[in-house]
Image (cartoon, helix red, strand yellow):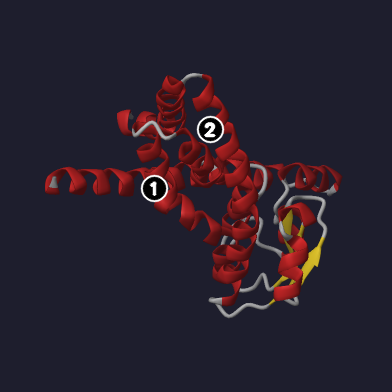
């Protein structure tokens, strides 16, 4: 129970402690943190989307369309990659790719969060402890990406797991209704279906939340090991 509580509290505690250290610099620290956050977000969005592509390709899948908003380098990326389309209703979205088999689909969705596991959480903590507000702000989107994605990639991860072939929502019809990267949109699809598989949607949402905390916890564990190793050699 105590370990579960620690896992739940860790993201908020890291954020709170890091911000307090950065704000020791006063208004300058706040400004640097916000500038770092803006820069980190701008940089992370296209990297995140390209890692989705990598997750698909390394498992044998094909990517046919990746939408990236022009504000996040969509024009430049379209000149480099023929599958990139400029413009998206989101900052970026992988819209046309192979979703079978399930392991390839999971790899595609989860690959960007390898950066949360390392170096995201570790360096968020380190920059906070060192009182480096720009770097702390820059790492916020990377370390907290699983929680930012609760209604997106996290839900999609949960929906893939919830609709595996051995579950009650494994039929092609249920997969079509439940699987996707927009929790709210798929809630509307569930509501419009008859019968409405609310159990599958709720399980997908819950699994997505658990996955988000688990991903951060793995990053924290690695960060703790690196910190201990550093102290042991100093």
Residue 75: percent from the left, percent from the top? 78, 64
Image marks 2 and 1: residues in contact by CB distance under 8 Å:
no
Residue 38: percent from the left, percent from the top? 63, 40
Where, by quadrant of the figure, is residue 160 drawn? Answer: bottom right
Please report the residue visible at 59 percent of the width from the left and 62 percent of the height from the top: 164
Which label's residue is closer to the chain start, 2 or 1?
Answer: 2
Please indicate, yes or no, whether residue 165 appears anywhere in the rendered image: no
The answer to whether residue 66 is above or below residue 153 is: below
Locate the N terminus by quadrant.
top left
The answer to whether residue 14 is above or below residue 79 is: above
Label 1: few (<14), some (14–19) or many (≥20) C-alpha neighbours in 10 Å: many
The answer to whether residue 168 is above or below residue 61 is: above
Where, by quadrant of the figure, is residue 174 drawn? Answer: bottom right
**Residue highlighted by disc 2:** 33
Label 2: few (<14), some (14–19) or many (≥20) C-alpha neighbours in 10 Å: many
Q: Which mark is residue 219?
A: 1
Please report the residue visible at 13 percent of the width from the left and 49 percent of the height from the top: 233
Q: Residue furthest bottom?
A: 60
Residue 9: percent from the left, percent from the top? 42, 28
Q: Seen in the image, is 55 located left or right of residue 78?
A: left
Please report the residue visible at 62 percent of the width from the left and 77 percent of the height from the top: 61
Give the spatial CA distance, label 2 vs label 1. Answer: 22 Å
């Amino acid at each position: 129970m105590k370990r579960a509580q620690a896992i739940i509290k860790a993201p908020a505690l890291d954020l709170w402690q890091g911000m307090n250290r950065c704000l020791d610099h006063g208004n300058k620290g706040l400004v640097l943190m916000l500038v770092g956050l803006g820069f980190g977000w701008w940089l992370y969005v296209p990297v995140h989307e390209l890692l989705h592509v990598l997750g698909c390709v390394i498992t044998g899948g094909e990517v046919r369309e990746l939408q990236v908003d022009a504000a996040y380098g969509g024009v430049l990326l379209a000149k480099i990659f023929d599958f990139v389309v400029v413009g998206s209703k989101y900052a970026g979205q992988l819209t046309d790719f192979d979703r079978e088999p399930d392991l390839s689909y999971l790899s595609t969705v989860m690959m960007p969060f390898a950066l949360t596991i390392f170096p995201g959480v570790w360096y968020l903590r380190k920059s906070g402890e060192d009182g480096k507000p720009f770097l702390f702000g820059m790492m916020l989107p990377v370390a907290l990406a699983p929680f930012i994605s609760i209604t997106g990639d996290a839900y999609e991860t949960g929906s893939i797991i919830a609709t595996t072939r051995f579950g009650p929502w494994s039929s092609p019809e249920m997969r079509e209704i439940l699987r996707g990267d927009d929790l709210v949109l798929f809630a509307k699809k569930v509501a419009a279906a008859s019968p409405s598989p609310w159990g599958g949607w709720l399980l997908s949402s819950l699994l997505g939340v658990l996955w988000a905390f688990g991903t951060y916890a793995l990053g924290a564990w690695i960060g703790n090991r690196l910190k201990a190793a550093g102290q042991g050699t100093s």
